[in-house]
Amino acid sequence: MALPPPARPGQRVEEVDTPALLVDLDAFEANLKTLADAVAGRGVRVRAHAKTHKSVDIALRQVAAGAVGVCCQKVSEAGILVDGGVADVLVSNEVVGERKLERLAALAGRARIGICIDDAANARDIDAAARRAGTRIDAYIEIDVGARRCGVQPGDPALSLARAIKDCANLDFAGLQAYHGSAQHFRGMAERREAIERAASAANQTRRLLESEGIGCPTVTGAGSGTFMFEVASGVYDEIQPGSYIFMDADYAKNDWAPPQPRFRHALFVLATVMSRPVPDRALVDAGLKASSVDSGMPMVWERPGLRFARASDEHGVIEIAAGAAAPAPGERLLLVPGHCDPTVNLHDGYVCVRGGVVECVWPVSARGAVF
Amino acid sequence: MALPPPARPGQRVEEVDTPALLVDLDAFEANLKTLADAVAGRGVRVRAHAKTHKSVDIALRQVAAGAVGVCCQKVSEAGILVDGGVADVLVSNEVVGERKLERLAALAGRARIGICIDDAANARDIDAAARRAGTRIDAYIEIDVGARRCGVQPGDPALSLARAIKDCANLDFAGLQAYHGSAQHFRGMAERREAIERAASAANQTRRLLESEGIGCPTVTGAGSGTFMFEVASGVYDEIQPGSYIFMDADYAKNDWAPPQPRFRHALFVLATVMSRPVPDRALVDAGLKASSVDSGMPMVWERPGLRFARASDEHGVIEIAAGAAAPAPGERLLLVPGHCDPTVNLHDGYVCVRGGVVECVWPVSARGAVF
């Protein structure tokens, strides 16, 4: 049973029902520009990560702003983006299972599709699916550069896998996926720089090894919104995959930010209403776990000193009011910066895009729930 | 852009793509029966909490099993349940805002609708909305019985509010909402018993006070899946609102369970596929934050000793493999018990209901995303 859209263009933001997912269009557009300016003339491509927004409208704007294409994490996400007109999608993840590979291979007949691989048998399965579909897929070897998630070890294990991929007639070996996910939220700049220097070194050594064995390594790709200027500075990365930069969130706000990493503006908010003031030092808002993911910490109350979002249940947010703070009244609306933007957008059906206090447009979260 | 349904009736569970939200129908039905048996002849009504499942199919089965109606947390949830044929819905939450109250009042023309109130001005707003719509709404006073969330204090503050409600021509004072949310997950039985004894005492004293002032208090309602037999034993509660009992989850599994609290079976799972085995002691599954909410802890790997779900990113679940454990192979499927069932179901569009290894039906998560 479909829900009505969360807002209508032309509404004043005061008329938008809550909870709602808001985009500050001025801040969002400034973030697109900040990224483009940061990498201008540095010789790296931008492949924006669509997992952050799951939106055709936003992906197309990223491409218009200069991105070569996007990344995503799931075959179903890729399908939705391609349906929406995105011509180049890297599924920056491993994919296992006949049905998923069939869909991936079919998609490669309609757009440029890339996949990450860390296992030779999986490479052969992907190749077989592409052959049955009569398509070709760009195959990136994922190397573990410190995140301890997926990926072969740098060096010889990557060489073995590259040889296996070169034997796959319908795969085009595209290079290395070298993404250090956990480094993105190392709080200190020196920590992040160090982690990326090690990642870049591992990626570079792996590329040199492959080249010395006659295997060209077209692209080294990776990086995120917390570190990308370090990947750029290394001279090793050809392409960066920042996602969260368009929106930011409360977890990223806890990082230190200093040159060369540009600071992005908060552009994503959950609009919430105070529905209870049971005692002087507490307010309850109508946005809880089901409006804002708390996996990386609580939301932050925007521009309200002394109001701290302390805990959440399914549909309640508990705001603690510090002594002397300007306390909100029942019915008052607050903006919350989500703790973690990516899983938060996946809770909502649409972005309410606001400029100058007015709803300018509503963008669907096109790939909401696309987990398979 | 609509996603295809997660499965088709008649499929073997091995054919269901992942991640998928699975219901073990035998366990689910056993849980319905366990609850009914536990309260049979005890003089309390069951008003099952629909926030746990957000499903018309499940709500109707709960009513068929003897529930007088359901609870939910949002006006939009109530609308969807009423559209689906549920005749009696208590919105066990405070609701503020003209548009929401308009919708609530209109709904009261099509079903029996209740609301919780902890503020006299809000009571008057609800009353005005009901008058404009020509409907009547059951008004419950929420008292804070220890959860420190919404609610007036027991005793005199509740009496003041009751008088205000009695002055509202379109509200019917229905009694007290006395739900101790945080007690549900106190690990020890003695802790939970103690907390509920205090809650019941506060509710009882409040009821007696109202009655002594000539205000009848028809119903005391509350309780959850972790404590409800204590509410029953108190003799104070007329109605209980258990939700999670139908499914259970990894957080509830950490509670102690002993008579009189029945133990329920795990009936809700996220089916996931191993998509990477990068090192001997690690497996990655395709179910991360966007398939399973980690607000109350990580999922549990079902019936696989030595496999521990250690951390999650958006679309990756990291499984640590203990030395000597039977390690899963790439492509192997695992069942995960969600950390917290309520926000997990809200990530999915449908329940894949399985019996004897075969998909029997797919139930929509009817009110997925209904946060307003």
Image: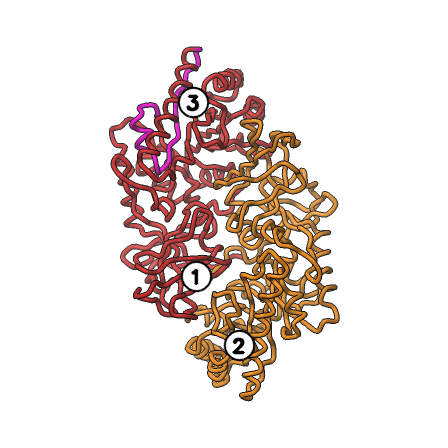
Chain colours: A red, B orange
Marked residue chain, label 3: A
- Report if the CB atoms under discs 3 and 1 are less than 8 Å apart: no
How many numbered marks appear? 3
- Is residue B76 toward the left or the right of residue A359 in the image? right
> Regarding mark 3 in the picture, which secondary structure is present there?
strand
Earlier in the chain: of badge 3 and badge 1, it is 3
Which amino acid type corresponds to the residue marked 3 in the rendered image?
Gly
Marked residue chain, label 2: B
- Is residue B107 toward the left or the right of residue A297 in the image? right
Q: Which residue is tagged 2?
A: B139
Q: Which residue is tagged 1?
A: A318
> Regarding mark 1 in the picture, which secondary structure is present there?
strand
Give yes or no for residue A227 being in the magenta stretch.
yes
Closer-to-camera residue (B267/A115): B267
- Whether residue A138 is visible here, answered yes or no, is no
Q: Which residue is tagged 3?
A: A175
